[in-house]
Image: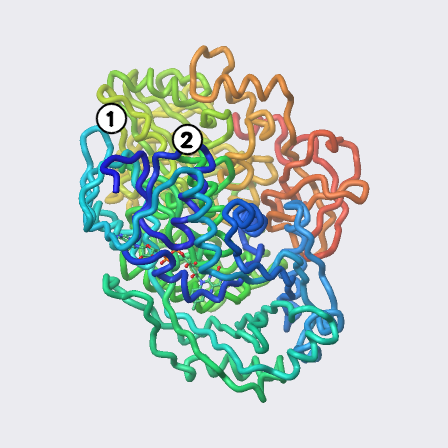
Amino acid sequence: MKSHTRVLVIGGGVVGCSVLYHLARAGWTDIMLIERAELTAGSTWHAAGGFHTLNGDPNVAKLQQYTVELYKEIEELSGQSCGLHLTGGVMLAGTKERMDWLKMAHAKGRYLGMHTEIISAAEAKKLMPLIDEKQFAGAMYDPLEGHLDPYGTTHAYAKSAKLKGAEIVLRNRVVDMAQREDGSWDVVTEQGNIHAEHVVNCGGLWARECGRMVGLELPVLAMEHMYFLTEDMPEVAEINASTGKEVITALDFEGEIYMRQERGGMLLGTYEQACVPWSEKVTPWDFGQNLLEPDLDRIAPSLEVGFRHFPAFENAGIRRVINGPFTFAPDGNPLVGPIRGLRNYWVACGVMAGFSQGGGVGLALSNWMVHGDPGFDVWGMDVARYGDWTTLAHTNAKVRENYARRFRIRFPNEELPAARPFRTTPVYDRLESHNAVFGDMCGLEHALWFAPSKTEAKDEFSFRRSNDFPHVAAESAGVREGVGLLEISNFAKYEITGGGAEAWLDRVLPNRLPARGRMVLTPMLNEEGMLIGDFTLAREADDRFMIFGSGLAEQYHMRWFQARLPVSGVTLRAHGLDLTGLQIAGPKSRELLSRLVDADLSREAFPFMAVGRFNVGIIPALIGRVTYTGDLGYEIWVKPEHQRALFDLLMKEGADLGIRLFGGRALNSLRLEKSFGSWSREYRPIYTPWEAGLERFVSTQKSDFIGRDALLRARDEGPKRRLATFVVDALDADVIGDEPIWRDGKVVGWVTSGGYAHHAKASVALGYVEAAAFDASAPYEIEIIGDRRAARVAAEPLFDPKGTRMRG
Ligand SMILES: Cc1cc2nc3c(=O)[nH]c(=O)nc-3n(C[C@H](O)[C@H](O)[C@H](O)COP(=O)(O)OP(=O)(O)OC[C@H]3O[C@@H](n4cnc5c(N)ncnc54)[C@H](O)[C@@H]3O)c2cc1C
């Protein structure tokens, strides 16, 4: 075993071997993998080996497609069979809602280049004769489904990596590690110490323990999972004989079961409601290639449905039951990437579908390590979507919720209830007493909308417009006609101070820095000139700045900032909930604030994009003259101990102005009619500022900032796509996001977000269209729940296109 390596990968499951292979393929050959026991000795060896491309996040779905297509490559390279059975598969819908969901999944697949088909129950029966078609409303067929041999696949990755120069050491546990001052790692293993420039935690079932070696509590938890194998079934033999093919895979959402052929019988697995976590606190190191005690009673409710939906199973004998553990993150997607503040430590864990996702995870992580960027939009699986706010018990509750909902529909207006409330701000009770319906963002409660009574304060889950519709309309009107009040503590707020702050921000951000007492909007770019942030930057003094951005991306942005901070001269602080906020917006907002602030707030004295410190009544506050509603408005930032007093003061003083509370859904409606994009929807690392319409917020005159060269190249090459606002001829459902945009019978783009713009009285969609297919006067169609609705491009924002209200 060598004593120095460029990369040390911990864990020889399918994920670790894929990471090793991808690093080797990218040309990094001084790399090694250390495995505690034998390859596959974690959750990999007892997997059912199924793979599919479907995922709620289209970017993750794309990486799943890549994974499935990769198997041929590693088979050819290694000479090791992956035992591929590319049978195709049906996803069966038992209800109309599920059919709607499948139609939307199919629509998303169109712009990803997937080849799924929506079929009737009778057609599904032809493809998968074991079903009772009377039980189903229809199905989706996916040719890229099947199953493989987990052992063979893991070894195919490993052999391919070795052929390219990687080293694999077995029966050697990583026991501990410590970081040197230069960021490299001294790794202690049972067979001796290794000095590694980078460490990758692919510890699977032990990822938590490997994280704890460096003081990290990763949000992963293992769950028990069961599947059984039947004895040979005559029905299976008959299908094999009559079609000359294997039985295709099937996924039955209502039964919460999946199945495939295994030899002459079938394999059937379930995501049961009565799910059970495994090793909740510590994973024992002596757990090897063991299985857990099966408990068929736990899966009995699913089996009952299964027997009804697949009658042949009723007569089938059970040959073997497998119960094994595997890990999940709270939302069921992997945890991949570098860890904020921990140099040269990477993770690729929480991978619950290693045979669908392992290849994509390996590719993204190796790109990240070798080129400094994952090369795709990996937000859906970026470890930075969780922060230090998670706890073991919070993860536990969320993972169990996710497991039990694995095959459940998540409606676009559905907030998941487990482990809530978890993080709240001081005005939470105030908002609750006004019948707020709350959403959960990074564990933080924020108001979505306000109901007229306690009993009505509940969403009716739907893909269509729902019970919140008239109330969100009233909130939007409250803003546009008078003054609205919204809590904004869920924004991220960063304070940057010090003698080096100006120079550092000038390099990190592509826009010109504002003058003292002013703010600017600015994107942030990576080296490839792609959008990785979208901020309001405020300057309070020569050496004091504030950045406001997406709360969702706080860890993501802090990781980026911290990795680029100079050794001295700049102090960076994420305020989190140390700074809470309220926003007032609407034509009467100036009048309201003027009553409470002893200063001239006229247009001339405190104009649009001004920032300053004022007392609001007795409360010290930082106030910025900007709001995301596109109306006259103010963001008021105060310490948490003042937030309730500020809330009460604004509500009391605003009473005769008709002040109205509004929530996140009204804010969305208001920003849509202004064509304001939002982080993680319109602004993501797959778009350039030219494509996203943010060119006025980058200053190509500036001689040096991150991403400048690539940005100029992208400008000269011209945008590949264009962000546009569409008005959709919708019926009772608006876009949610990820719907295809059609022109002349072809898919030419995709929707990034949308909804109903209440003041403009229009169904709005924002989305990207291929540059060659963009014509502002052309007729388009946008597919909403399988129905192509006519859409036209709105050449300018539907509300206040000249911005007179906002600037007034
Ligand atoms: C019953 C069951 C059925 C499943 N069916 C499917 C399916 O059909 N399709 C699908 O895609 N997925 C399925 N899975 C999930 C799949 O098994 C996982 O996604 C996959 O195994 C995750 O691989 P991994 O490499 O991340 O983790 P693991 O397989 O757990 O690998 C981690 C490895 O790291 C090693 N290790 C950990 N710590 C150390 C250390 N300190 N030093 C050295 N080595 C260390 C371990 O020994 C282990 O070999 C199933 C899982 C179960 C339990």
Q: Residues within 10 Å of mark 2 (few under 14, many from 20)?
A: few
Residue 521 visible: no
Sequence-wise, the earlier of marks 2 and 1 is 2
Q: Is residue 329 above or below residue 93?
A: above
Image region (quadrant) for ligand 1: bottom left
How far across and how far down the image is residue 387, in percent? 32, 46
Q: Amino acid at mark 2?
A: Gly
* Residue 68 left/right relative to 244: left
Q: Is residue 145 above or below residue 425?
A: below
Residue marked by disc 1: 571
How far across and how far down the image is residue 257, in percent? 53, 72
Q: Work out how far the residue at label 2 is from the one at label 1, CA to CA, in angstroms.
A: 24 Å
Q: Amino acid at mark 1?
A: Thr
Name the image quarter holding the N terminus.
Answer: top left
For this rendering, which residue is in front, 398 or 113?
A: 113
For this rendering, which residue is in front, 283 or 377?
A: 283
Q: Quadrant of residue 400?
A: bottom left
Q: Quadrant of residue 260?
A: bottom right
Residue furthest to the front in view is 79
Q: Is residue 808 above or below residue 135?
A: above
**In terms of secondary structure, where does tag 2 sit?**
loop
* Residue 728 left/right relative to 53: right
* Residue 173 left/right relative to 141: left
**In terms of secondary structure, where does tag 1 sit?**
strand
Residue 245 visible: yes
Residue marked by disc 2: 372
How far across and how far down the image is residue 783, in percent? 71, 50
